[in-house]
Amino acid sequence: MRTNHSILLLAVCFFALCWAGSVSAKKPGDGEKIYNELKEKDGLYADEAWQAYVTEVGERLLATSSAAGETYYFTVVDNPTVNAFATGDGYIFVNRGLIAYLRSEDELAGVIGHEIGHVVGRHTSRHKSAKLLGDVLGFLGSLATGTSAIADVARDYTAKEVAGFGRKYELEADEYGGEFLARAGYNPLAMIDVIQVLKEHEAFSRQVQKRPTVYHGLFRSHPKNDKRLHELVNKSQRLLPDTLRDPERDFWEMIEGMVYGDEAATGLIKGQSYYHGSLRVVVTFPDEWDLTNTRTQVIGKPRAGSSDSSITLQPMSAPENKEETPAQYVTETLKRDDVINGESIEVNGYPAFIGDIEVAGGDAQVRKIAIIYKDGSVYMFRGEVGPLGDPATFEEKWRFTVDSFRAMTAADLKVANNQRIKVIVARPSDTYLSLSQQVSIKSYAEETLRAINGHHPHGEPRAGDNIKIIQ
């Protein structure tokens, strides 16, 4: 009797697990939550033509799959990272940062087909945990809202298991993708081309930019020359229709004018405002002041030598004691005992401290300090009035600048990031070195042009080819 009871219990547990797995696989919501959060925080790429284009390619592929007739959602995310991902409820997200590295509609179809393959293969429900979804939501939320330290979140995201489904599922998604491409009239070998694009980007990020990559699929689990991958993709060629369909749109016309990169990621001055995309901070300095942005700080001074005043903003190390207040930070972490007239305040919802520094020497009339805490990070303002300055006027400018400190919004990112892709036809004399003199990229301009055109590390443009530059 006990044995039968055990068998019955095991059977009940088995069917309960199967039922739970089935419900989990069919349960919508993951992608919808991400989509709604992106939409609410202006995280969707604000170009209706591109949203429509990606949907057209996605629907063309979907119509050839076993999911034909089902409702899928294809979305371009306003994010500069080279990434794309899918959720089990049929949401396909492609970052504009990935599109910038592609060279044809076939390659775009390769990315989307691969992601559809993950959904059709139910890889998300077979592999992903609730914690993983939380990581993705948190990552996307931080990008869109700036409510957490973006650098820490990005590093955490990179390290998570979302970086890959594993070789088995990636190959299966590639096999599905190759079949979808062929049946839809695209070249299935574009799957291999996309892998090469991503491998070159990975090498560029690692060797030149010294940054990790976060793309979850395609190349991370198998290389371009993977024998099994080639067998699966080549097998798809027999599915090509007798007459190939025209592309949905002209890819090169579409990519002309697409936003590129994240100018504000390392700090950017526009007008009187300083934007830092990684720290998600905006500070506005007084009118008629000149701003200088260095690697460690931003400095504002009155224009044309009308005064010898200055205000400096500098990110600082977080205190070891997490309970330490901004006022205590001055005395305990900075070890300053010369601050007087101190006051604990709030600046746009962030705890802060502001005070005067005793002037014991030198020719300064006034010295000031302010500390602001934001999302686990510390920011220090320092102000000084020299012998030619007016302390009363400076006090007004000082408080204006400190009080302007706020979190960066999605609207700020759109103002700060105005680099766009321009398509040119290469001339016989063009090299990436010569083209780099025409672009607005501040760092690694020549190497970046090679990477976005599929010629990393040593290739050069060929006369007559379409070439992407950044302006």
Image (spheres, grey):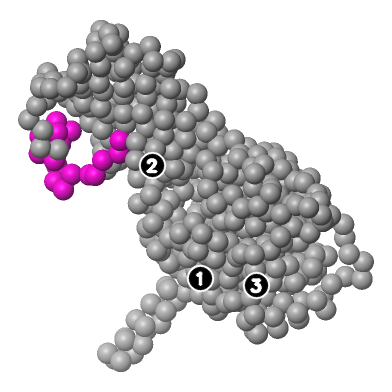
Please name the residue shown 60% across and 40% down the image: 440
The secondary element bearing badge 2 is classed as loop
Q: Is residue 112 visible?
A: no
Q: Is residue 288 above or below residue 267?
A: above
Report x, y in % for residue 371: 23, 31
Q: Quadrant of the N terminus?
A: bottom left
Task: Write down the residue under mark 3.
Answer: 174
Task: Write down the residue under mark 1.
Answer: 165
Q: Is residue 323 magenta?
A: yes
Check the image and name the residue furthest to the left: 337
Q: Earlier in the sequence, mark 3 or mark 1?
A: 1
Report how far apart the C-alphas of labels 3 and 1 lie in the structure. 12 Å
Check the image and name the residue furthest to the right: 243
Between 313 and 128, the residue placed more toward the observer is 313
Contact, mark 2 vs mark 3 (Cβ under 8 Å): no
Q: Is residue 199 above or below residue 284?
A: below
Magenta segment, which residues?
314-333
Indicate left or right for 146 with 422 as reference.
left
The answer to which image quadrant residue 113 occupies is: bottom right
The secondary element bearing badge 3 is classed as helix
Q: Is residue 465 visible?
A: yes
Q: In front: mark 1 or mark 2?
A: 2
Report how far apart the C-alphas of labels 2 and 3 lie in the structure. 42 Å
Between 203 and 152, the residue placed more toward the observer is 203
Residue 295: image tag: 2
Please name the residue shown 34% across and 81% down the image: 9
